[in-house]
Amino acid sequence: MDKMKATYETMLGLAAEMVLDDAVLKFRTERIYRDIDLALASGDEDTFHRLAEQLNAIRLSH
C-alpha cells in the first residue's frame, strides 16, 4: 500500500508541476504580446524585434 501512495503522490506532484509550467508559459506569452503591442504603438523597433525573438524562442521550445 505504501508503494501505491508514493506513486500517487509522485503523479500528483507531476500534475501540479505541469499546471504551474503551463500557467507560467501563458503569463510570459501574454506579457510579451502586451509589450509587443506597446512597442508597436510607440514605434520602438528594437524592442519589437527583441520581443518577437523571445516569443519565437518560447514557441519553439514548447
Image: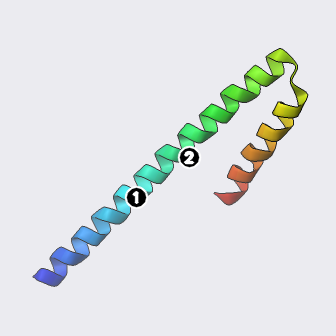
| 13 left or right of 28 in image | left
Which residue corresponds to mark 1? 17
Instruction: Give 19 or 42, whichever is nearer the viewer.
Output: 42
Q: Which mark is residue 25?
A: 2
| 17 left or right of 55 in image | left
Q: Residue at x 36, y 60 (%)?
A: 15
Circle 1: residue type: Glu
Instruction: Give 46 or 23, whichever is nearer the viewer.
Output: 46
> Is the Cβ of the residue at disc 1 closer than 8 Å to that at disc 2?
no
Please tell me in which quadrant of the rendered image residue 51 appears: top right
Instruction: Give 42 or 3, whichever is nearer the viewer.
Output: 42
Circle 2: residue type: Leu
SS class of the residue under badge 1?
helix
Q: Residue at x 82, y 22 (%)?
A: 40
Q: Is residue 55 above or below residue 31?
A: below
Q: Residue 28, how many percent across, how many down? A: 59, 40
For label 1, the crowd category at 10 Å Cα-Cα, with few meaning under 14, some 14 to 19 and many 20 or more, is few
Please tell me in which quadrant of the rendered image residue 32 appears: top right
Quadrant position of the C terminus in the picture: bottom right
Identify the mark nearer the N-term, 1 or 2.
Answer: 1
SS class of the residue under badge 2?
helix
Q: Is residue 29 above or below residue 34?
A: below
Q: Residue 8, how many percent across, how many down? A: 23, 71
Q: Residue furthest top?
A: 41
| 30 left or right of 44 in image | left
| 53 left or right of 10 in image | right
Q: Which mark is residue 29?
A: none
Q: Residue at x 68, y 51 (%)?
A: 58
